[in-house]
């Protein structure tokens, strides 16, 4: 699948960050292990339909199967803050349903794309990718850009291009998830300190833990 990205914008971004060390790739072996374990459990609970079962499926049921497979794909830790849209045409779904080899190619291509490292997402404060899946390999391509693209129009462009998406990940949802995780961690630290101090904690710490 071909992938296009605004290299001029990236060049300007690199120039502005080259002296700050702000461009760096994040990794988490523990997180990767947990992700792999979750994917294994999900794949076991959602086995791949046999060709005969697939033939008897309604198109809506088949679409749901593909949606679940995409949702189970591991995502590079460098792309957690990226908004991703996948557009699959009706003709592409028909071919995937009737051609196991093409279905496998599409899913493997998406899996490979999801796993690719993209440290620019963190450097640019987010990112946007749209994958287009057509009836043939030649009709499959992808686009990518960042929030500052075209005079900070990155978000608006994604909203426009993501209309009617078959599958989406939005960085706003990930930000909210991270905020909830940070709140939970703060409360756990507060409870641990309460236990260590025999139930004694300052009013300020208590207020922060409850906010």
Image: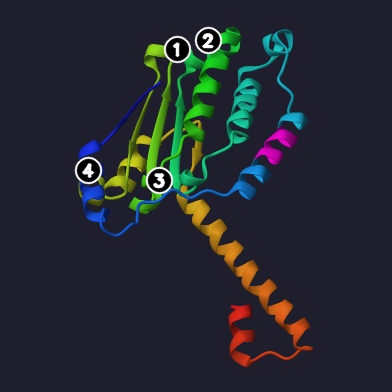
Side of 153 where 169 appears, left or right: right
Magenta highlight range: 36-42
Q: Main secondary structure of the magenta part?
A: helix
Lower position in the chain sequence, tag 3 or tag 2:
2
> Which mark is drawn over residue 11?
4
Q: Residue at x 68, y 36 (%)?
A: 39
Q: Which residue is mark 3?
A: 119
Is disc 2 in contact with disc 1, using a CB cutoff of under 8 Å? yes
Circle number at residue 135: 1
| Mark with earlier residue (4, 1) | 4
Q: Which residue is mark 2?
A: 95
Other-residue count near label 4 (Cα within 10 Å), few / some / many at <14 / 14–19 / ≥20:
few
Looking at the image, which is closer to me, 15 or 3? 15
Model colouring: rainbow
Query: In the figure, 116 relative to 193: above or below?
Result: above
- Between label 1 and label 3, give the one nearer the viewer: 3
Q: Counting residues from the N terminus, which is met first, the one under dot 1 or under dot 3?
A: 3
Q: Is residue 45 left or right of residue 180?
A: right
Give the Cα distance between marks 2 and 4.
Answer: 39 Å
Q: Residues within 10 Å of mark 2 (few under 14, many from 20)?
A: some
Q: Dots 4 and 1: beta carbons under 8 Å?
A: no
Please state the horizontal and vertical placement of residue 45, each as a whole percent of the image: 77, 31
Distance, label 3 to label 4, CA atoms, is 14 Å
Q: CA distance from mark 3 to mark 2?
A: 34 Å
Of the two numbered discs 2 and 4 in the rendering, the one whose residue sits closer to the viewer: 4
| Element under disc 3 | loop
Label 1 residue SS: loop
- Give SS at disc 2: helix
């Amino acid at each position: 699948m071909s992938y296009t990205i605004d290299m001029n914008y990236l060049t300007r971004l690199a120039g502005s960050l080259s002296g700050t060390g702000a461009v760096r790739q994040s990794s988490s072996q523990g997180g990767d292990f947990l992700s792999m374990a979750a994917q294994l459990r999900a794949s076991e609970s959602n086995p791949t339909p046999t060709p005969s079962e697939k033939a008897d499926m309604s198109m809506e049921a088949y679409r749901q199967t593909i949606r679940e497979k995409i949702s189970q794909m591991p995502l590079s830790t460098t792309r957690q803050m990226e908004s991703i849209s996948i557009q699959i045409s009706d003709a592409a779904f028909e071919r995937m349903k009737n051609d196991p080899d093409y279905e496998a190619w599409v899913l493997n291509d998406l899996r490979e794309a999801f796993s690719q490292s993209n440290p620019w997402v963190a450097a640019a404060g987010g990112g946007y990718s749209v994958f287009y899946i057509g009836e043939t390999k030649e009709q499959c391509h992808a686009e990518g850009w960042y929030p500052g693209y075209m005079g900070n129009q990155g978000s608006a462009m994604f909203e426009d291009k993501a209309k009617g998406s078959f599958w989406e990940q939005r960085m706003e949802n990930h930000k909210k998830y991270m905020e909830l995780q940070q709140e939970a961690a703060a409360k756990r630290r507060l409870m641990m300190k309460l236990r260590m101090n025999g139930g004694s904690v300052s009013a300020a710490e208590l207020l922060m833990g409850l906010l």
